[in-house]
Structures are given as structure tokens and as C-alpha cells.
Image: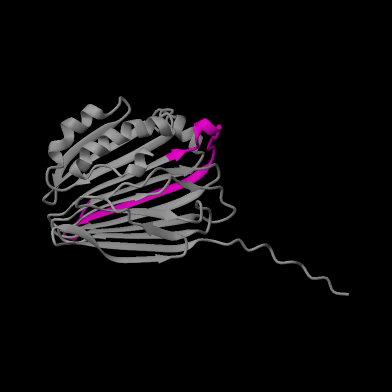
Amino acid sequence: MTSTLSEPPRFQRIQATGRVSAVFRDGRTRLERLYQEGAAKIRLPRLPGTPLEAVLINTGGGLTGGDRLEWNVEAGPGATVIATTQACEKVYRSSGGEARVTCNLKVGEGGFLAWIPQETILFDQSALTRRLEIDLAPDARALIVESAIFGRTAMGERVVRARFRDHWRLRVGGRLVHAENLAFDGAVDDILQERAGGNGAIAMATVLLIGEGATEMLPAAQALLGPQDGASAWSVGGSGKLLARLLARDGHALRQGLIPLMRLLNGEAGLPKIWSS
């Protein structure tokens, strides 16, 4: 009698793509195209005013090793789009490989895009690589906000080891004006406790405003920041750029500092109601 070894279990993995684009027509921003595949869903609340709000949803309930998620958001010439998420994205412990999230953002002439997803929460032994590719027309504007929380203190969670890589590339008129790579790999808790690391913080956010008037916002932005935070502004490639970094002891404290800054930098577009719910 011949024995047969059973194959190892095959786990279902997310392969999802969501695309949304908007145009400015007849005095307001209107939906142009919408595409959803897999666990990627997009909802468009009917709200008064010019901006089009896109709420991005991962119906998979989170990410883990082997998952692939891609978002594509485009604001056409003169259009105003606010893109956010229905909830914080959770990155769970990986049983093998890493989760990968790719975000492609594009803004046409005179357009504005606010990319303000809710926080990414990483769990112990999680692995995530995230890539943001942002292309702006020379006179376009964008507000880009990404934040990460290493464990929820209210739930007694602690992230001892994890891998998190964040890769940003932003171009204006085809010219690279902002690039950054953030990498945590291994003993995350030790790194965050070091003074030159997180200085005890487990929550962080990067806020980037690109376009006309960005540099003039610096004094007001600095007035809102805490002692561990910092901001700077300068002109590059003919565009103004304001960059802020925030650190906090937990997710609640991070949001308390982040929301007033986002309200300031997002101007008349305001914040999605989902951020205050």
C-alpha cells in the first residue's frame, strides 16, 4: 500500500485593483471612470460642492503575506478629488511573503487631489511594502498623507518584529521633485524606542503638500505641530513643497495632531466625514 503525503494548505490571497477618475465639467467635478476588481471597492458619497469624494474599501478585511492591492486615482484638469479609506488598513502576521500595496495618483492641469487614507495598523510579524507613484501637471496641486501605527496600545498589542517598507516618488511635469524610502525590518520595537528612531513613539505620519501656496503654509503648519514633530518648506522644480513628519505615543494621539494639520492644508475641500466618525 502506497501512502500519499497531503499537500500543504493553500491560503486564499487578495488580488485586487480599484480605479477611479474624475473630470471637471459644467462647473463641477464629475465621475469619469470607475473600475473595481476583487476585494477593491470604491464608493462615491453624494455630497454638495465641487470635490468628488472616493471612499476606498478592501473587503478582504485586512492584508497579510501574499496579498496584492492596487489603487489608481486620477483628477483631470480642473477637477478636485478627495480619496480616503472606509477604515484603517490592518496588516496581519504573515505566514510567508509580504503584502504589497501600490497607489498610482495623477492630477491634471489646475486639478487638486487629496490622498488621505486612514491609518495603516501593523501587527507583530507583519510584512508590508507600499509604493506611491504620483504624477502632477505643472500647475496641479496635491496633498498626500500616509500614517502607520505599530500595534494598538488600547488593545494591549506590541509589535516586536515586523517589516515595513514605504516607497514614494512624486513628479511634477515629469520631473522628480520628491522621493523617499522608509524601511523597518526586524526588531521594530527596539528601533522605535531608540532616541534616534521613534524616541518611544509607535505612531507616525508623513504629510506632503505640493503646488502653489505650499511654502506660505509653513508658519501655520508649524504652529499646529507637537514637540516631536517637524515641518519644512521649499521650492523645487518650480513647485512649492511643504513636508511634515508627526510622531505620537499611540494612534489616538497621532490623530489628534494630524486632523488639525490636514484641515489646514486641505483648505476649502475640508475632510471626509468618515475621518470624524
* Coloration mode: one colour
Span of residues in magenta: 149-177
Magenta run includes residue 14: no
In the depicted structure, whether residue 107 falls above or below residue 239: below
Residue drawn at 41 percent across, 63 percent down: 17
Work out whether residue 242 can be spotted. Answer: no
Could you tell me which quadrant the N terminus lies in?
Answer: bottom right
Residue drawn at 34 percent across, 31 percent down: 256
Could you tell me which quadrant the C terminus lies in?
Answer: top left
In the depicted structure, whether residue 17 falls above or below residue 115: below
Relative image position of residue 254 (x, y in whole percent): 37, 33
Q: Between residue 225 and residue 46, name the one nearer to us.
A: 46
In the depicted structure, whether residue 5 falls above or below residue 117: below
Task: Tell me where residue 52 sits by quadrant.
Answer: bottom left
Relative image position of residue 105 (x, y in whole percent): 28, 57
In the depicted structure, whether residue 7 falls above or below residue 178: below
Residue drawn at 32 percent across, 31 percent down: 257
